[in-house]
Amino acid sequence: MPDTRTVLFDLDGTLVDTAPDMARALNRVLADEGLPALVFEEIRPHVSRGAAGLLALAFGDALDGVELDRLRAAFLVHYAADLAAESRPFSGIEKLIGEIEQAGMCWGVVTNKPGWLTQPLLRALDLSARAACVVSGDTLAQRKPDPAPLLHACALVGNEPAHSVYVGDDERDIAAGRAAGMDTYVALFGYLGADARPDTWGATATIERPADLWARLAQRRDRAEVS
């Protein structure tokens, strides 16, 4: 059983609660189109699906390519203007990454969010300089659920996947982590919808709050020492 040297996080819905700013941007698009706003509780479970998922929620899945591109561009303009107005690390995340750092491990971010949005958000939250690596949705040609972004993150920090774990709140996060050969953890505090079945995703474990991950990492360390 290998010890843990790197902890990798998904961004939206795992490391940072970006739902308020994403929801505001979506409702601004709806207002531009002369449509009523959606309530926050309806939007939140779809945030991990990004702009396309949010627009599908608001306008349906039948949007043609041209219309989808137009609405996505409008959404991104609204979102980029205030991407860190209300977004904050989830409660307990700051303590968790502090414990990771104090233990001599490193942590990083692997997200499908494009780099031109990921980097400003992390800088605004004073997380960019602390992350050992940041792999965005446009860093490589591949995106999650392909394991390539996670393998790239491991290469950047110089640690093997077997010595790394990945935490996310979407099935594609777990699929990517498993394919990369990592232990995976589902963040139940993230943006899981009512119909989500994380128990069927094949993750190593689920965590109710960030502190639970630290306990899991301690168990992993203890097993490594025994083996």
Image (tube, rainbow, N blue to C red):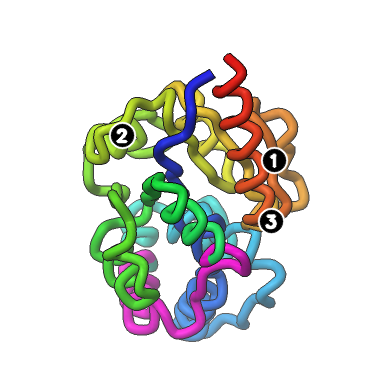
Give the structural element (helix, strand or loop) at label 3: loop
Label 1 vs 2, first from the N-terminus = 2
Residue carrying label 2: 154
Q: Nearer the viewer, residue 155 or 99?
A: 99
Q: Is residue 70 visible?
A: no
Q: How far from the left and from the top, in percent, is residue 191?
A: 63, 57
Q: Is residue 74 above or below residue 200?
A: below
Amino acid identity at mark 1? Thr
Q: Is residue 161 visible?
A: yes
Residue carrying label 3: 209
Which residue lies at the image location 61% right of the left edge and 81% below the top edge? Answer: 37
Furthest residue in direction top, as rendered: 227
Residues under numbered marks 2 and 3 in contact, where contact means CB atoms less than 8 Å apart = no
Q: Which mark is residue 206?
A: 1
Give the structural element (helix, strand or loop) at label 2: helix
Q: How far from the left and from the top, in percent, is residue 201?
A: 65, 30
Q: How far from the left and from the top, in percent, is residue 126?
A: 35, 74
Is residue 91 on the magenta stretch?
Answer: yes
Q: Which mark is residue 215?
A: none
Which residue lies at the image location 30% right of the left edge and 39% below the top edge? Answer: 153
Is residue 135 on the magenta stretch?
Answer: no
Which residue lies at the image location 37% right of the left edge and 80% below the top edge? Answer: 78
The magenta stretch spans which residues?
72-94
